[in-house]
Image (cartoon, rainbow, N blue to C red):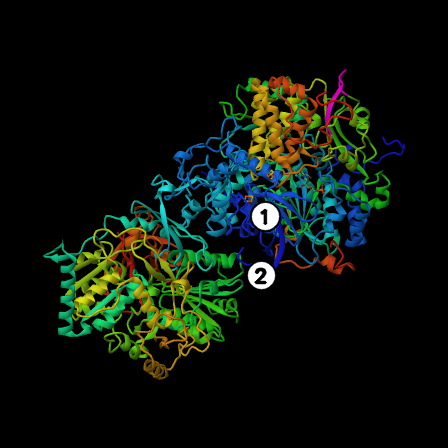
Amino acid sequence: MSEQTETTVKITIDGTEVEARDGELVIAAAERAGTYIPRFCWHPRMSPVGMCRMCIVEIDTGRGPALQPSCMIPVSEGMTVTTDSEVTKKAQDGVLEFLLANHPLDCPVCDKGGECPLQDQAYAYGPGESRFVEEKRHFEKPIPISDLVALDRERCILCDRCTRFSKEVAGDTLIHFIDRGNQTQVNTFPDHPFASYFSGNTVQICPVGALTAEPYRFKARPWDLDQVESTCTSCSVGCRVVVQASRNEVLRKQGVDIDGVNWGWLCDKGRFDFQSIHADTRLAEPMVRSDDAHARTSWADALDRSAAAITAALESSGPAGIGVIGGARLTNESAYAWAKLAKGVIGTDNVDCQLGDGLPAEAVLGLPRATIDDVCTPGGTILLVGVDPKDELPVLYLRLRHAIVEDGATLVELVPHATGLTELAAQTLAYAPGTAADVARSLVSAAPVAAGGLEADTIAAAKAALGDGPVRVILGRGNLADSADVIAAAAGHLVGGVDDIAFLSGLRRGNVHGALDAGLAPGVLPGRVSLDDGRQWFHEHWSTVPGARGLDTRGTLQAAADGKLDVLVLLGADPLSDFPDTDLATRALAGARTVIAVDTLQTASVAQADIVLPAAGDAEVAGTTTNLEGRVSRLDQKVTAPGTARPDWVIAAELAFRLGDDLGLESVDDVFAELATVAASHRGLTADAIGVDGVVVPLPVAEEAPAEPAAGTESDVDPEAAEAQADAEAEDTDGSEAEAAPAPGPAVPGGIRFEAPPVSVPQIDGYKLRLVTTRKLYDEGAATAASPSLSKLAPGAAVLLHPHDFDRLGVTSGSQVSISNREGGRGSLTVPVQVSDGVPRGAALLHYLQPGGHASALISSDTVVTDVRVEVVK
Amino acid sequence: MSDTGKTIPQMITGRFQYDDSHTIERYRATDGYAALRKALDMGPEAVHNEVKAASLLGRGGAGFPAGVKWGFCPPGVWPRYIVVNGDESEPGTYKDRLLMERDPHQLIEGVLIAAYAVGCAQAFLYVRGEMAHAQERIAAALNEAYAAGLVGKNILGSNFSCDVILHWGAGAYIVGEETALIESLEGNRGMPRLKPPYFPAAKGLYMQPTIVNNVETLANLPWIIRNGAEAYTSFGAENSRGTRMFAVSGHVKKPGVYEVEFGTTTFRDLIYGVCGGIRGSHTLKAFIPGGASAPWFYEEHLDLPLEAGAVGNAGSMLGSGAVVVMDDTTDAVKAAWRVVRFFARESCGKCTPCREGTSWLEKIMRRMLDGHGRPEDIALLLDLCDNISPQITWPPKQTTICPLGPSAVSPIASAVMRFKDEFQAYCGGGDIPTSVTIGGKAYLPPEGAPAGV
Amino acid sequence: MPRFTAENTILAKEIIGRYPLPKSALIPLLHLAQEQDGHVTEAAMEHIAELCGVTPAEVLGTCSFYEMFKLEPVGKYLINVCTNISCMLLGGEELLHHLEESLDIRPGSTTADGMFTLEDVECIAACTEAPCLTVNYRYFHQISHDEADKLLDDLRAGRRAHEVPVHGVLGKVRQQIPLERRAGAAVPGECETPVWLATSDATEGAGA
Ligand SMILES: Cc1cc2nc3c(=O)[nH]c(=O)nc-3n(C[C@H](O)[C@H](O)[C@H](O)COP(=O)(O)O)c2cc1C
Ligand code: SF4
Ligand code: FES
C-alpha cells in the first residue's frame, strides 16, 4: 500500500486518458483522477479482498472488456476502464440490490443513518422499490462484542473491514467470520471479547451501522453534528482527528488519515476520552482555600492572590523561591507564554514540564532526531528502548507493527519487560531493573559480555540483529522505578557506539515535546537551546533570564518538602498521582507555602492547592501542539470552556501584568509569531507551513542560513562559539522586531549538549525483588478517570513475577501478597500476584497508577532503583 | 465401444475386478510401482516430457493439460508442493471416491511420479471429509508404502524424498476449487483466492509454487509411464487422449461408473449403449453432461462425442465426467431447484452476488414449488441470474471471484428456456423478459424449434 | 469441558509436526476433538488455538465453515440422506421423508434418546447408487425403505457396531509415518533445489 514506485502508466478512464502510479489499484487511480467508483470492502490502508463486488467495472487490458473488481486490479499501461457503461451500471446495481436484500430497513433508528455509504449508494444507484419479498436473515439484535463496541449482525454486509483491521492492522484477531455462505456472520469466540486498544477504529471504518460505539450510540444524528479538524493530545503521537460536537458538547472523535502519523487510526483512549471534557469534575470557576475548604472566588481575586504570593516569594527568597511544574497539557502557545512568565518575568529556572516520569530535557532535545517515518522505513532497523508503545503510544505501535510485518523492518528491544511488540521482535533484551545502560554498553561493544541478567550470547544475537546499518531508536522512560538517568546513560552508550543512529522520543505526555521546545524545563530556553547558549539572545526579548540552572520536578518537590519553596505552581500537574514517589509529593504539597493549581479537572493535588485557576482544555482552545517527532500541528476549538475557565496563556499574561510586566501577547497568533521568531527550532514557522498535516520542526533551512538549529548534529556544539555567534547576531538585529520569516533572518542560537549521566546500581539484598513500574493504556490518570467508558477498563493493580520467583514465593496465581518498601521509608500495598515469563528474574512488575494500589506509593525517587519485599499475606 | 473395434484398456479401473485391489500385494502383482521405478531411471525432465507428450487433460473439471500446468512453476522457487484434489463433491460426480477406495496405491504412485517430475518436496492428499472409507484405505496404503520404502525418505533407495500426507476436509463443496482447497489446507476457511495474481502453480500453498491435480488425473500417470505417451495417445480423440471415467446416474437402466475411450465415445453410446438406455418405457427429457454446473443437454445433443471441445461448442461442458439423465417424468422446475439449492448451500459467502444471489434464487424457486409462484417470478429469476452472470452466456461471465455463483445460473437458464410452460404452471403465467439477454447456446432452442417446446 | 487428553495431545503435536506451518493442522485437530468428544467443544477449540498458535476466534472461524464439525452434541448416529439431483430422481426425497416418520424427527434434529440425528444433505458421491445415505459417513447404497428401517433397528441393537463407529470417528486407520522413513515437512524459506533435480542432468529445465 504505502510503497509505490513513482513511475507512471497511462490508462483511459471513461474515455479520458490519465496518468496512474505504476502498481496502483484501478479504484485508487480512478479516484485521484476524479472518478469515484462505489465500494464497501476496499480500504486504502488495508489489503484488498474483493469481497463486496460493488467496485466492479469493465476493464480492458487488450483481451476485450471484462467486469473486474477495481479494488483488486493494478493499473497497467494502455488499460481502458469503463465505469459508466450499461453493463457496469447493471452489475453494480445488481450487487447493491443483493446487499440490500437482507439488510434491515431501520435507517431511521440507525446511528449510521445520514452518513451511511450503503444508504447513499442506495439513493444514488439503487433501483428503489425492493424486489426481495422473501423472509430476511435474522440475528439477535445488537450484541456487545466488547465494553466499547456493539455489533448488529443483521446490518452487517460482510465487507471484512473490521475483521481485516483486527487481524492485519491491530494484530489481535478477536473478531472473525463465523459460519458460511448466507449465514456468515462476524463474531467473537465465546467469552473472548474484542478487548482491543483499537476497537473504535472498526466502528469508524464499518460502512454501515453494524458496529456502534457505546460512548456515541444514539447520542446524535450525523446532521446535528458539526466538526473541526484538530490533533489528539491524549498522548504525544499527535494523531489527526475531527472533533464533532452538537450544542456545545463534544460527542465524537474520528481519525483523519495523514501519511506521516496515524493513517486514519486512533486508539480507543484518544477516541473516547473526550468524555472528560464534560466531566462533572471539570473546574469551572477560580477557587481559594479558606480553612480547609475551597471557596469560589473571582478571577481578579484569584489572580491578585497568586501575584501577591509570587511577589512575596521574590522578595523573601528571590526567583529560586518559586517553582513551576507541569505544562505538557498546554498548547505550544500556552507553554511559551508560561515559559516567558516563569523564566522571562519571574526569572526562576525551577521549571519542569515533566513529573519525574520522563527523561532529562537534554536527552530529548540534544540527541540526533528521527521522525516516525524514519523509524518505520521499509527494511530498516528499529531499536526500542524502555517504552512499550502498545500501552503508551498506541498508534505508533500500529505504525511499527506495519513496518515490521508488512515492510520487513527489524525490531530489537531493550526493555524492562516483554512488550506488545515482543512477539514480532528479532531479539528482546529484557534487562534487570537499573541495568539498561550496562546492557546498552555491552550491545554496542565489539564483543558483548553478559549484562543486566542477560547472557553474553543473547546480547550478541541482538547485536547481530541490529546489523551495522542505520539504527533508529525509540527512546522512552519505561520503568518509572528506575531513575531517568538509567535510560539517559543507555542512550549515551548508543550514540557513542553506533555510527548512523537517530532517536525518536518515546515520552508519552500530550504536548511534552512542545513544552520542552518552549523551554519548560530546567537549563533550557525556548527553541531547544541551553540556558547558557541562549541567555544573550533572550535578554534581547525578555525582561530577564534565569541566572543559573534550576531544579527539575524532583528537586522542586524536595525543596518544597524541605520548606524551601514559597510558591509551587501546578501547571496541569497532579504530582500526588503522576509523580513516581507519592511520599515526596505529599510532603511537598504540605511544605510549599503557597500552592497554585492551574488545571482543567479536580485532582488529588488540586484539592490541596491554595489557589485554583480553572483552565480551558482540549477542544476548547485553538493553537498548535507538537508530537514526539517534533511535528507542529493545529489544534482547533470546537466548544467553549465551562464557566469562566480560560486558556493557560491568558492566565500567564494576566499574572505577568499583575507582576508589573507585560508579556506583549494579545492573541494566540501573537504568541505563535513570537515563538516562530525567538525559538531557533521554530524559526520561520507559519500557519501555511503547518497546513493540514502539520510540519516537523526545525524547517529545513536554506544553505546560507548562519546557525543550523540543533538537529542533534550540533549536540557537540561548542558553547563559547555558539554564544559568541549569538552575540554577533544580537548586534545586527533587533530580534523583538523581526517577524516570522524563513531564513535568512536573525540567526537564532541553537544547540543542546547531551551528556550521559553516570549511574551506578547498588547490590540487591537477596530477599528482595527490584521494582518495575510501567504504564498500561488505561489507569487512574485524570482524563481516563473522568471518562466513564474508559475508567472501567483499567486492569487493576497486580504484582507480576518471573516463574522462578513466583515458585519461590510458593503462592497460587491470583492470591493476595503484600509488596512493600519500608526500608526505603515508603509504604506497602496488598494486591494479587500473577506469574509472567515476560518479567525478568528478580524483578517485580507492578503497573503504574492502577486501581487497587498505586505503585508510586512504593517508589523512592532519591535512589536509582527501588527494591521491595513481596510476602504472602497470611 | 469405439467404432474402430480396438479393445479399450481399463487403464485406471483395471484392478477394480479384484476384492483385494487396495492391498500392496495385489498392486505389486499387477505392475504396481513399476512406473515409479521406471520414472526414477528416466529422470525428472524425461518424465515431465512424457506426460506432456501424452497430453493428459485434467479430470477435475477445467480439463487443462497436466504437463503444461506443471511447467508453470516459476524456476528456482522452492519448496514446491503438490496437492491432490480428492474433494469430489460436484453433484453427479462419482469416480475419485472409487479410485481412492479401490486402488489407493495407483493414486499414491501417480502422486509420487508427479512430485518427482516437478520437484515437489512434499505432497498433500486432500480427501473429501465425508469419505471415511477412502481415508481408511489411503491411510492403510500409505502405511504399507512407507514400510516398503516407497514413500518418504530416499524412495526406493534413490535420492528422491517426499512425504505424502493424508489430509481430509470437513464438508464444504467449495473447497474443491483449487485456491479454496489451498486455503483449507492452510487451516483457513475454504474461500477461493482471486486469480490473478494467485495461480497455484505460481503462488499456491503458503504462496509457494503448488501443483493441484485431480485424483483421476494422477491415477493415469502410472499407466502412461509404464506404457509410454505414444501408447496412451493411440487411444482417444485429437485433443482428448486416453480413457476417461464417467458416472452415469439418474433414469437409466444401468447407472454406473464406466471407463470409456475419451473423445470418441458419444453420449448416445454411453446412455443407450453402456447404460442400456432410459429406464422402463420412458423417454429422455434432458441430461446434464458434466456435473451440476453444466448447462443441460437434450435429445439433439446425444451424438456429440465426450470431448471437451465439442461439448463446449455446443454450449455446455464435460466438466467432471458426471452425466445425470432425466426422463419424461422429471419435474424440470424441481430438478433445477435441487441444483440451485446446492449452490446456495455451498456458497462460501465471500462474494455478494453469490452469497445473496444464489440463496435468493433458491428462496424464489422453493416458494414457486410451495405453490406461491407469481407471474413476475420468471422475469425476476432471470434478471437475478443476469446480475450474477451478466448476459447469461456460456462460458459464463461472472460478477464473482469463482464460478460457483454463476453455476447456479445454468440450471435455471436451461430449465426456463426449455420448459417455460412448466415454470408458468407454477407461476400462473409470466414470461421471459426482453430486458435480459440470454447468450448461452445450450439454453437456446435448437434451430427451428420455438422457445419453450 | 474437555480439552485433549494427554494421549491425544501427543498425537496432536505429532500431526502438527507433519505440516510446514502449524495452522495447517487445524482441520485434522478439529476432527480429533470431534472424535474424542462426539462434537467440537469450546475447550477443545481453545486448546487447539494454543497448540497451533492462533486465536480461538480463528479456530472457530475455520471450524464453523465446515458442516461436518458439530458445535453442539448430535446423536450417536448421524444419518445423512442425499436429496441432490441424482438421488432426487430415484427417490431420495421419499427416503428422507420415510426416515423422518420412522424416527419422528425433522431433518437437522436428534431423537429424544440421543441415538439418531437426521440430515438432509447434498451429493455424497454415490450418485449411481441412488437412493443412498450415510451413517457416520459409512455408505449405504440403493437402500429401500424397509432396508432403512432394518438399518435403524440394527444400529439401535448395536448390530452394526463393527461397520459403523460412533459419531466423530472417521477413518479407523491412522496414517503412521515411521521416523526413519520421514522425509520431513518442507518449510517455506528453508528449502533449496531438491537433490534429485539438482543431480539430474536437467537441473534448470526440470519442472520449470
Ligand atoms: C466450484 C468448483 C468446484 C470444484 N470442485 C472440484 C472437485 O471436487 N474436484 C476436483 O478435482 N476439481 C474441482 N474443481 C476444479 C479445481 O479447481 C481444479 O481445476 C482441479 O482440481 C485441477 O486438477 P486437474 O487439472 O487435474 O483437473 C472445482 C472447481 C470449481 C470452480
Ligand atoms: S463465487 Fe461464491 S463460492 Fe465463489 S468465491 Fe464467491 S462467494 Fe465464494
Ligand atoms: S470494494 Fe472492490 S470488491 Fe469491495
Q: Position of residue C130 (x, y in %)?
A: 68, 24
Q: Which residue is mark 1?
A: A72
| Residue A722 vs residue B95, the one in the foreground | A722
Please state if C69 lies on the left or on the right of B46 as rendered. left
- Under circle 2, the secondary element is loop
Residue appearing at x 48%, y 69% in the figure: A471
Q: Is A775 situated above or below A495?
A: above
In the image, what residue type sits under mark 1? Met
Q: Range of the magenta residues?
A: B278-288
Please state if B185 lies on the left or on the right of A665 as rendered. right
Disc 2 crowd, CA 10 A, few/some/many (<14, 14-19, 20+): few
| Chain of the residue under label 2 | A
Q: Which residue is mark 2?
A: A6
Q: Position of residue A126 (x, y in %)?
A: 52, 35
Disc 1 crowd, CA 10 A, few/some/many (<14, 14-19, 20+): many
In the image, what residue type sits under mark 2? Glu
Q: Is residue C63 visible?
A: yes
Task: Tell me the quarter of the image containing the N terminus of chain A.
Answer: bottom right
Residue extending farthest to the right is B5
Q: Position of residue C95 (x, y in %)?
A: 62, 20
| Residue A660 vs residue A495, the one in the foreground | A660
Q: CA distance from mark 2 to mark 1?
A: 20 Å
| Chain of the residue under label 1 | A
Q: Is residue C2 visible?
A: no
Q: Position of residue B333 (x, y in %)?
A: 64, 22
Please state if B217 lies on the left or on the right of C162 as rendered. right
Please state if B90 lies on the left or on the right of A139 as rendered. right
Q: Quadrant of ligand 2?
A: top right
Q: Which of disc 1 and disc 2 is earlier in sequence? A: 2
- Under circle 1, the secondary element is loop
